[in-house]
């Protein structure tokens, strides 16, 4: 999850660039030191970085909804080459991504390095270290590292956005709200990242124990000396019981204290924050002569409750979708004859259904256990649905005072549907309702498709192609094409681009729109990007733009321009000031992204890196970038070949196998890059590479 | 040729000496044992032997990527070791079996220039060398391309260009012709032959017995880390027993001769075979009719 170009205001862009630069500098100096002790370390870091980058382009299958996602890879990189080197690599990867896909940005590079690089690497690494100290297996430690690292990235991103997008006083709360907004999609992704990180590490240790040891991943006390001198030396030894207890205790304490601090900070700022809930809706309601404060459900904790409901609705919906789909699939018309007679009662009976008698023993036990599972799911789903509905209708669940007013309101609404009384004049309830319904719909869809895929208790899914990698290569081909722009020196392009990006942040909307128009025109007419490719590349920025417009429109108070009067609920108000601010920001983002695309699609990356070297960016960083660039494509191709081989041997496999295949793919890439790094180093020094400054 | 890294027309090739050299891998595998060989300046030497025979190990010892467990290796009186690594690397060019290991720069031009730049040459000289090597290896048109956009064979040629640009006095190649198309293979071998004729010492590991007699002067046969045979081509190939022990076979043309003529002479290339045939027919030692028309002969009998 990268913050797009242009979203952060100039002062925040600078503010985040500072710690990022410091962290990268520290990382580089540590790398340099280690390179002195072990000269092949540089190529190891670069090649492992390229491998992790290539891996992060691969889509992981997400079992529900049959879609795919991309792992972030930073926690894995941190475990493999250490957190500091991983910060450096993340910086390079973010730079390359910004230039190849206009994914992230140059002015937001600092912020992204802080969230992805620093937060992701250190939290991932620390989780792994702690877990290993406590004696966790490689898979479990990797799982925790991947999951917490991923969540840390999102937490940091949310707060960077909160600080950048909301006024100072409301920034913490805004960030918290954004984090909660990411959470429903991000939590499953974090779990996947964990499975992936742990799986890759486990496969690596199984396939090549020597490399695992060389990287300091060896298990427990039985760590023989690393085969290559001077390699990373963090050996994970089991601590004694006392140490383990102390560490776990400390971790829990830190977690509690930081969580408490976070909540406290949010609570402190709550009073000042004018969000969807309080400000606009209330005023509008009063203007229209309606009662503003008759909360049907007291959403004083607003967004938190919102997402509890959303989450509950998703879970409930998923269970319902699962069960209903299962019932349909098992109904007599949908199934073969053997169990046909029983099917109806099985499905209807749920938990208590009797075991079918006609079928073979194994088959029937399998089906019985399937029914058990289904039944439990149905029960859970039912309970959840009831809970959600009850939460909606019963004031008892509301966190406000439990007084008769709520009940009277309910009674009045039920008795007099056309009455003046709105359920709540606060936007909270309207939004809450919308979210609950959306959650239910989403959940049903997910449950339905999951039930289809998990038929027989195991999910089957088609192995996804590696489409992310296609983008890098297409962008690279485009960049190498000769156009009028290729004649311009990369140093000039880079300088002009950086200045324009900066001006774009501070100048008004007019400048941004002009910049956007010029960039698009040049991209289409001079660089000759096909417009469909351009639209595809701009799509993420467009989505961000629309979201910004909506978010600002709803959160900045002012003259209402759109006023949707939901029957029996509060009106939804979009203010003109908010819209204007939203459009302003969207213009900045779109202009920045199109300028980045122009820069990246008209200049090969090595030329840009060369220009950076000329501008006195540390040579080690540039060397690493060049090596990463060189091997990225090789690894992408290797990954593609391996994946094709997997697909050829079974295009549809159970999810566990798919994930296993994915993990071994990742581990294989790491192994190849590890082996290759030594040969690359040999090749370098055979041609006098050690004499380089 | 004036622009070549060596300047004038002749190259002062290096002499390589293995003295009682042995090597044991960290795992305990003895890959080389008691190798005593001198490869003289200007020799074209093929190193052959079964898979795992120790060829790659021997070549790596030569350039200092590995260090001998026993004995020593020297190039022109410089003993190969930690301290002399750069000195040896400047004299000996090493071509990796996989060009993807060797080409680590983003573009072809940058990669070919990498070595000369490290030799401390001036910009003009580096450019001149890059141009010469790229032209010599037939990759001049590819100079501005990124390396990942090349085919495998093209990468191999670029890798060779990068080695040649350093102006080595000995060339060490690990299976240079594998996965090249026939034309590229022939071109590569002609190039090596041409450089060798100017004095460059060429040492290559290969499995291609049909190709070797066309170009190499000498051959080293390795078996289980020992030198099974060493010497001029004809001598080594005259004794078929060596070859079988090393899981090698005769060149096909020699094999054909062995089947049809029980002569002691054993031509190794098509050219030699043709000469030999003409000689035998002229001397009346060979009647081609029964060989070429076996059916009619059978019918007459
Ligand atoms: N890195 C290594 N660690 C341990 N043993 C090795 C290593 N590399 C090679 N060996 C062993 O050393 C012996 C010689 O290997 P070498 O690579 O020199 O053979 P080769 O003649 O080049 O074979 P090929 O024709 O397959 O390339 C083999 O038995 C091999 O298994
Ligand atoms: Mg070999």
Image (spheres, coloured by chain):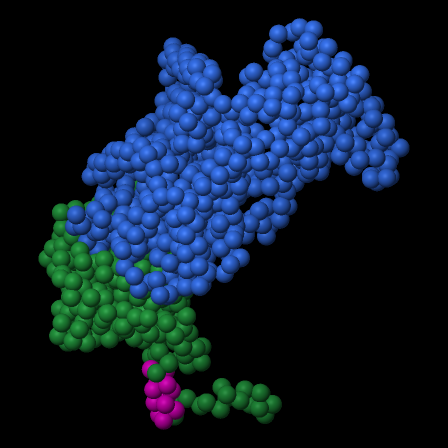
Chain colours: A blue, B green
For this view, does A77 lie left or right of residue A549? left
For this view, does A562 lie left or right of residue A31? right
Query: Majority secondary structure of the magenta segment?
Result: helix
Q: Which of A388 and B300 is in front in this view?
A: A388
- The quadrant in which residue B196 appears is bottom left
Q: In this view, does A246 lie above or below B98?
A: above
How many numbered dots are placed on residues in this image? 0
Q: Position of residue A103 (x, y in %)?
A: 44, 45
| Residue found at x 59% / y 46% | A463
Q: Is residue B275 above or below residue A87?
A: below
Does any portion of residue B260 appear in the rendered image? Answer: yes
| Residue found at x 79% / y 30% | A364
Q: Nearer the viewer, residue B214 or A366?
A: A366
Q: Does the magenta stretch include residue B68?
A: no
Extreme-top residue of the structure: A403
Read off the magenta span.
B272-283
Does any portion of residue A277 appear in the rendered image? Answer: no
| Residue found at x 51% / y 28% | A557
Q: Position of residue B213 (x, y in %)?
A: 32, 73
For this view, does B23 lie left or right of residue A384? left
For this view, does A448 lie left or right of residue B270? right
Extreme-left residue of the structure: B77
- The quadrant in which residue A61 appears is top right
Q: Where is residue B163 in the image (x, y as percent from the top left)?
A: 24, 62
Q: Position of residue A680 (x, y in %)?
A: 30, 50
| Residue found at x 35% / y 41% | A506
């Amino acid at each position: 999850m990268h913050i797009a170009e242009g979203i952060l205001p100039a002062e925040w862009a600078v503010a985040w660039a500072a710690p990022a630069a410091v962290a990268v500098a520290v990382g580089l100096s540590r790398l340099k030191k280690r390179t002195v002790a072990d000269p092949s370390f540089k190529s190891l870091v670069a090649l492992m970085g390229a491998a992790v980058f290539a891996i992060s382009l691969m889509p992981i299958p997400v079992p529900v909804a049959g879609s795919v996602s991309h792992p972030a890879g930073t926690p894995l990189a941190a475990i493999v080459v250490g957190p500091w080197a991983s910060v450096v690599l993340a910086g390079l990867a973010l730079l390359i991504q910004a230039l190849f896909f206009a994914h992230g940005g140059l002015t937001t590079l600092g912020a992204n390095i802080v969230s992805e690089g620093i937060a992701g690497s250190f939290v991932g690494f620390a989780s792994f270290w702690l877990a290993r100290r406590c004696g966790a297996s490689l898979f479990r430690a990797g799982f925790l590292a991947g999951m917490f690292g991923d969540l840390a990235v999102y937490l940091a991103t949310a707060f960077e956005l909160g600080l950048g997008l909301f006024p100072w006083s409301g920034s913490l709360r805004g960030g918290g709200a954004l984090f909660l907004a990411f959470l429903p999609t991000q939590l499953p992704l974090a779990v996947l990242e964990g499975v992936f990180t742990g799986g890759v590490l486990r496969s690596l240790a199984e396939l090549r124990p020597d490399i695992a040891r060389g990287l300091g991943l060896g298990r427990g006390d039985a760590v023989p000396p690393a085969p290559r001198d001077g390699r990373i030396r963090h050996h994970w030894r089991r601590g004694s019981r006392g140490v383990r207890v102390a560490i776990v205790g400390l971790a829990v304490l830190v977690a509690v204290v930081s969580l408490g601090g976070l909540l406290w900070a949010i609570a402190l700022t709550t009073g000042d924050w004018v969000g969807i809930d309080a400000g606009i809706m209330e005023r509008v309601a009063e203007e229209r002569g309606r009662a503003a404060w008759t909360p049907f459900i007291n959403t004083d904790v607003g967004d938190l409750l919102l997402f509890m409901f959303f989450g509950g609705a998703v879970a409930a919906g998923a269970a319902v979708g699962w069960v209903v789909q299962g019932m349909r699939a098992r109904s007599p018309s949908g199934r073969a004859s053997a169990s046909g007679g029983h099917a109806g009662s099985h499905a209807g009976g749920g938990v208590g259904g009797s075991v079918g008698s006609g079928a073979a023993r194994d088959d029937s036990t399998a089906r019985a256990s399937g029914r058990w599972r289904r039944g439990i799911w149905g029960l859970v789903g039912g309970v959840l649905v009831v809970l959600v509905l009850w939460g909606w209708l019963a004031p008892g669940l509301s966190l406000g005072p439990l007084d008769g007013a709520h009940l009277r309101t309910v009674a009045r609404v039920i008795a007099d549907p056309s009455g003046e009384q709105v359920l709540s004049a606060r936007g909270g309830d309207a939004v809450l309702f919308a979210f609950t319904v959306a959650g239910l719909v989403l959940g049903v869809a997910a449950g339905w498709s999951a039930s289809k895929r998990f038929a027989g208790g195991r999910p089957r899914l088609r192995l996804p192609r590696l489409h992310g990698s296609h983008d890098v290569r297409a962008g690279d081909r485009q960049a190498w094409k000769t156009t009028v722009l290729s004649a311009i020196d990369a140093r000039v392009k880079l300088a002009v681009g950086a200045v324009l990006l900066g001006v774009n942040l501070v100048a008004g909307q007019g400048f941004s729109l002009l910049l956007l128009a010029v960039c698009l025109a040049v991209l289409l007419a001079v660089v000759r990007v096909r417009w469909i490719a351009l639209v595809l590349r701009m799509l993420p920025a467009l989505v961000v733009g629309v979201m910004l417009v909506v978010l600002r429109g709803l959160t900045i108070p002012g003259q209402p321009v759109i006023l949707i009067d939901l029957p029996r609920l509060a009106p939804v108000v979009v203010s003109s000031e908010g819209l204007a601010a939203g459009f302003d920001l969207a213009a900045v983002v779109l202009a920045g992204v199109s300028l980045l695309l122009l820069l990246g699609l008209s200049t090969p990356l090595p030329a840009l890196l060369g220009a950076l070297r000329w501008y006195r960016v540390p040579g080690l960083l540039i060397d690493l970038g060049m090596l990463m660039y060189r091997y990225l494509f090789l690894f992408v191709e290797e990954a593609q070949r391996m994946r094709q081989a997997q697909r050829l041997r079974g295009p549809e496999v159970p999810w566990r196998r798919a994930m296993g295949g994915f993990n071994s793919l990742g581990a294989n890439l790491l192994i190849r890059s590890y082996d290759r790094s030594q040969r690359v180093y040999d090749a370098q020094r055979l041609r006098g590479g050690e004499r380089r400054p | 040729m004036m622009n070549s890294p060596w300047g004038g027309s002749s190259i002062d090739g290096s002499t390589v000496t293995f003295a009682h050299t042995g090597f044991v891998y960290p795992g305990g595998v003895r890959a080389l044992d008691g190798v005593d060989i001198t490869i003289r300046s200007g020799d074209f030497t093929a190193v052959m032997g079964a898979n795992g025979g120790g060829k790659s190990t021997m070549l790596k010892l030569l350039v200092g990527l590995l260090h001998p467990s026993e004995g020593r290796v020297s190039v022109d009186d410089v003993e190969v070791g930690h301290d002399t690594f750069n000195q040896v690397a400047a004299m000996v060019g090493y071509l990796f079996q996989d060009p993807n290991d060797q080409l680590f720069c983003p573009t072809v031009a940058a990669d070919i220039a990498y070595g000369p730049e490290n030799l401390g040459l001036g910009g003009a000289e580096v450019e001149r060398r890059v141009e010469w090597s790229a032209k010599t290896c037939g990759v001049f048109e590819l100079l501005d391309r990124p390396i990942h956009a090349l085919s495998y064979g093209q990468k191999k040629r670029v890798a060779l260009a990068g080695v040649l640009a350093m102006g080595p006095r000995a060339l060490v190649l690990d299976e240079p012709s594998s996965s090249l198309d026939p034309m590229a293979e022939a071109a590569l071998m002609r190039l090596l032959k041409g450089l060798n004729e100017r004095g460059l010492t060429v040492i290559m590991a290969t499995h291609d017995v049909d190709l070797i007699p066309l170009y190499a002067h000498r051959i080293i046969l390795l078996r289980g880390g020992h030198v099974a045979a060493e010497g001029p081509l004809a001598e080594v190939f005259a004794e078929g027993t060596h070859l079988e022990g090393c899981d090698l076979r005769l060149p096909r043309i020699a094999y054909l001769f062995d089947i049809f003529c029980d002569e002691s002479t054993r031509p190794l290339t098509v050219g030699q075979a043709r000469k030999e045939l003409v000689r035998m027919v002229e001397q009346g030692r060979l009647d081609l009719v029964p060989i070429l028309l076996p059916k009619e002969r059978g019918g007459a009998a």
